Image (cartoon, coloured by chain):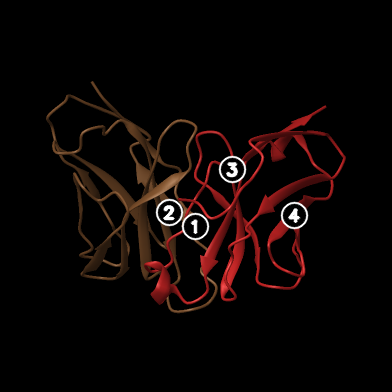
């Protein structure tokens, strides 16, 4: 039972920003938001994670609302290679309470980047 | 190159046979995981291991067995007791499970088909 809700699919034009939303209204104070993506028939790839503050790395930006009930993953300039299923996951910070780092994957958002 | 290898990429077996899936990592990670993915679904945790000679059941351990005799290896055996073994199997590893941040690195996966 995933603790996040994501739209099943989204389209984005190549070169434009892709904004992928995620609702996690039952998130607890010590739970992190993680984003992974999975290109067809490959293993998932870590993108970014955050607790309260917005985060940015070379792949993406993560915007977390002040109440932490939702977040948005932003791919600033989407390319065709960004076409994948994107998973938003909440994970307890202290793995002792989460079966040693278990990631609970929902069904994710299938992002299609079109030329 | 550091990473996780899974072999083979495709595996076919007859119903009633046990089959062992290989997972090796040279990242010097303490923790290793096995996930199962069915078409159109997210990943579900089968087993995980936090340290050599220790492993724990995940959410769907029935019909599976594992061993962790070496730090770099975490083989998964799909037994004849597993009712629906046909799936995409993914192995992952992480540095450890003691920190707040625990990025998991995934292998390329093994697609098992039971005929």
Q: On what subunit does the disc labeled 1 rest? A: B
Q: Are marks 4 and 1 in contact (CB under 8 Å)?
A: no
Disc 4 is placed on an element classified as: strand
Q: CA distance from mark 2 to mark 1?
A: 8 Å
* Badge nearest the viewer, 3 or 1: 3
Going from N to C along the chain, the mark reached first, 2 or 1, is 2
What residue is disc 4 on?
A72
> In the shown orientation, is residue B66 left or right of residue A74?
left
Residue B47 in picture, x, y percent from top left: 29, 56
- Marks 4 & 3 on one chain: yes
Residue lying at 44% horizontally and 46% vertically, measured from the top left: B43
- Marks 4 & 2 on one chain: no
> In the shown orientation, is residue B44 left or right of residue A68?
left
Work out which quarter of the rendered image holds the C terminus of chain A and state it.
Answer: top right
**Chain ID, brown in image:** B
What residue is disc 2 on?
B4
Q: On what subunit does the disc labeled 2 rest? A: B
What residue is disc 3 on?
A108
Residue A62 in picture, x, y percent from top left: 74, 60
- Marks 2 & 1 on one chain: yes
**Chain ID, red in image:** A
Q: Are marks 3 and 2 in contact (CB under 8 Å)?
A: no
Q: On what subunit does the disc labeled 4 rest? A: A
Where residue B105 is drawn, which disc sits there?
A: 1
Disc 1 is placed on an element classified as: strand
Residue lying at 49% horizontally and 60% vertically, measured from the top left: B104
* Badge nearest the viewer, 2 or 1: 1
Residue lying at 83% horizontally and 34% vertically, measured from the top left: A14
> In the shown orientation, is residue B5 left or right of residue A72?
left
Q: CA distance from mark 3 to mark 1?
A: 18 Å
Q: Report the label total.
A: 4
């Amino acid at each position: 039972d995933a603790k996040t809700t994501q739209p099943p699919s989204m389209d984005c034009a190549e070169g434009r920003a892709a904004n992928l939303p995620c609702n996690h209204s039952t998130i607890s104070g010590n739970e992190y938001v993680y984003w992974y993506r999975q290109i067809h028939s490959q293993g998932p790839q870590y993108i970014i994670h955050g607790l309260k503050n917005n985060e940015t790395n070379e792949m993406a930006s993560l915007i977390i609302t002040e109440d932490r009930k939702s977040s948005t993953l932003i791919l600033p300039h989407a390319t065709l290679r960004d076409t994948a299923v994107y998973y938003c996951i909440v994970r307890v910070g202290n793995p002792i309470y989460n079966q040693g780092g278990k990631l609970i994957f929902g069904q994710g958002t299938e992002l299609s980047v079109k030329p | 190159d550091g990473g996780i290898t899974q072999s083979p990429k495709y595996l076919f077996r007859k119903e009633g046979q046990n089959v062992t899936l290989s997972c090796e990592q040279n990242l010097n990670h303490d923790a290793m995981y096995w996930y199962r993915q069915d078409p159109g679904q997210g990943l579900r945790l089968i087993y995980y291991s936090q340290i050599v000679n220790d492993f724990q059941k995940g959410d769907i351990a029935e019909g599976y067995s594992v061993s962790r005799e070496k730090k770099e290896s975490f083989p998964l055996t799909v037994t004849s007791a597993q009712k629906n073994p046909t799936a995409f199997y993914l192995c992952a590893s992480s540095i450890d499970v003691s920190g707040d941040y625990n990025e998991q690195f995934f292998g390329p996966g093994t697609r098992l088909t039971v005929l």
